[in-house]
Amino acid sequence: MTVLQSIFLGLLQGFTEFLPVSSSGHLMLAEKLFDVNAGLFFDVMLHLGTLFAVVIALRHTLWQTIRHPVASRKLLYLVVASVPTFVIALLVKLFVPESAMGYVLPVGFALTIVLIVLSDKLSKPRFRLEQASWASLIVTGVTQGIAVFPGLSRSGSTISVMKLFGLNGSDAAEFSFLLSVPVILASAAVEGYEALHVAIATPWYCIVIGVVAAFLSGLVSVYMVMRAIKTKSWIWFAVYLLVPFTISLIVL
C-alpha cells in the first residue's frame, strides 16, 4: 500500500462513516475499483480513527451521560438500542459467509435511498430524545444491526428510522453518533482479534497516516451531518447514492 492509498482510504472511511452513504459500501467499491487490498488490521485502525472523531465531537454529551446516567437516560437508551444490534451482528457473523456480502451491496444502497427519501418526506418532528418510546429505540437498534450489511448506511438508516418515529433531526443525529461508539468498539475488538492471526503487510507509517486521515475527515463528517440535518434536505444524499448503487451493479 502506498501513502496516497492510505490517505484516500482514510479520508473515505472518515467521511462516509457518519454521512448517510455507507462507509463499508464505499470501501468495498474503492478496493474493487482500484485493486487495493488494505488488510484487516488497517480496517480496524481506520475504525478506531473514526471512533476518536465521534468521541471528540460529542465529548460534552458523552461526559454528561457518564456523569449523570440516570438523569439524562441516554446511557439506558444506548443499552436498549445496542442489545438488538449486537444480537443481529453476531448472527450475521456466525451464519452469513463473507463472500456473500458483496452480492447484497446494491440492495443496501437501494434501502438507504428509500429510507432517506421516506424520512425526508414523511417525518414530522414532535419529540426530543428524552420522550422517545421503547419501540423506537428497539427498532433503531434492529436497523443498526441490519446495517452490518454493506451498502446500508448505519448513520443514514438509524437517523431516518428515528425521524420516522417523530424524533427531531438534531437529537436523532446525536443519538445515532453516540450509538456508534459501542458498535465501533465491539467491531474493532472482534476484527482486532482476527487481525492477530493475520500477517500485517501494510507499513506502519501508512497505517498512522490512514488513521489520522480517518480521524480528521470523521470530525468534518460529524459536523457536516449535524449542520445539514438542521438546515437542509437530506434528499441530495439519496440522489448521490444513485452513483455508487449503479457502480455496484456493474462491478460486483
Image: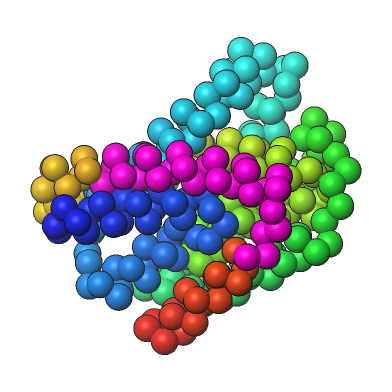
Residue 245 is one of the magenta-drawn residues: no
Q: Is residue 77 left or right of residue 178?
A: right
Instruction: Tell me which residue sits at (53%, 53%) in the image.
Output: 19
Quadrant location of the C terminus in the rendered image: bottom left
194 and 55: which is toward the camera? 55
The total of numbered circles placed on residues is 0
Q: Is residue 203 left or right of residue 170?
A: left
Q: Is residue 33 left or right of residue 121?
A: left
Residue 227 location (% of width, % of height): 63, 43
* Residue interval drawn in magenta: 210-236
Is 75 located above or below residue 5 in the figure? above
Q: As drawn, which residue projects farthest toward the top?
A: 67
Instruction: Tell me which residue sits at (44%, 65%) in the image.
Output: 25
Instruction: Tell me which residue sits at (71%, 40%) in the image.
Output: 170
Is 17 located above or below residue 248 in the figure? above
Observer able to see residue 217: yes
Residue 130 location (% of width, % of height): 80, 30
**What secondary structure predominates along the stretch shown in magenta?**
helix
Q: How is the image coloured?
A: rainbow
Instruction: Tell me which residue sits at (47%, 74%) in the image.
Output: 244
Q: Hey, which quadrant is residue 117 in on the image?
A: bottom right
Residue 109 location (% of width, % of height): 55, 71
Quadrant location of the N terminus in the rendered image: bottom left
Observer able to see residue 80: no
251 and 212: which is toward the camera? 212
37 and 1: which is toward the camera? 1
Residue 50 location (% of width, % of height): 41, 41
